[in-house]
Amino acid sequence: MKLGRLNHIGVATPSIADSIVFYRDVMGATKIHQPFDLPEQGVKVCFVDTPGADGALNGTQIELIEPLPGNASIASFLEKNPSGGQHHVCYEVPDIHVAKAEFEALGKRVLGEPRIGAHGTLIFFVHPRDMGGVLTEIMETPKPGEGH
Ligand SMILES: CC[C@@H](C(=O)O)C(=O)SCCNC(=O)CCNC(=O)[C@H](O)C(C)(C)COP(=O)(O)OP(=O)(O)OC[C@H]1O[C@@H](n2cnc3c(N)ncnc32)[C@H](O)[C@@H]1OP(=O)(O)O
Ligand SMILES: [Co+2]
């Protein structure tokens, strides 16, 4: 397994609307995408762009996630962290199925089968207890012209 680009940091929040105000007014974010529902993952999502090395807005994103009704795991996370908090980190890989096989060969618990994530490419999660306490999302790098 080769460590890939840090695509995003997932931040759980009880209110995406309030978090948008925070990232705009406190952190000075200049590009905050329109929030959208992702019912397959049980979340409302909003991406906040951060600058890349050249200053352009092509760096790691903050992924704000708010639970949709019925999402027990994020609701449970917010019960323990009522004002929200860092929820997961997401690394890119060139081939999702190769990456899944590699984690499993190392005895890491992959949570379910690869599924389409918020960027339109396949993702899976690895259990935080097998990853030094960090819920880890693995995402296939979008091909040129693919994903968002
Ligand atoms: C926006 C779409 C998509 C994308 O494209 O980017 C997303 O990012 S969706 C993000 C939300 N989806 C997920 O998180 C799916 C994967 N997560 C899970 O399957 C579960 O959340 C979980 C990791 C298995 C935990 O669920 P559960 O076992 O029901 O919760 P517990 O409260 O019982 O916790 C068990 C254990 O794990 C620790 N934990 C839980 N969440 C986290 C976390 N976010 N970071 C670190 N550790 C976490 C929790 O403290 C418990 O630890 P122990 O008490 O030591 O056992
Ligand atoms: Co994510």
Image (tube, helix red, strand yellow):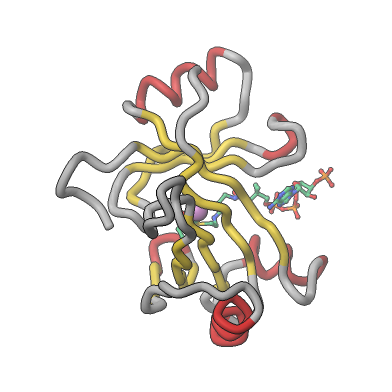
At 62% across and 73% down in the image, what residue appears?
27
Q: Quadrant of the rendered structure where residue 74 is?
A: bottom right
Q: Is 87 placed above or below 47 here?
A: above
Q: Is 102 placed above or below 95 here?
A: above
Q: Could you say where residue 128 lies in the image, as x and y percent from the top left?
A: 70, 39
Q: Could you say where residue 133 lies in the image, as x and y percent from the top left?
A: 76, 39
Q: Is 136 placed above or below 14 here?
A: above
At 15% across and 49% down in the image, what residue appears?
145
In the rendered image, the quadrant that contains the C terminus is bottom left
Q: Quadrant of the rendered structure where residue 93 is?
A: top left
Q: Residue furthest top?
A: 105
Q: Could you say where residue 107 lies in the image, as x and y percent from the top left?
A: 63, 18
Q: Could you say where residue 146 lies in the image, as x and y percent from the top left?
A: 19, 48
Q: Going by the image, does 78 lie left or right of 120?
A: right
Q: Going by the image, does 127 lie left or right of 96?
A: right
Frontmost residue, 7 versus 117:
7
Q: Going by the image, does 63 lie left or right of 109?
A: left
At 46% across and 70% down in the image, what residue appears?
45
Q: Quadrant of the rendered structure where residue 79 is?
A: bottom right
Frontmost residue, 91 versus 105:
91
Exactly how many numbered labels are in the figure? 0
At 46% across and 30% down in the image, what residue appears?
4
Q: Residue furthest right?
A: 80
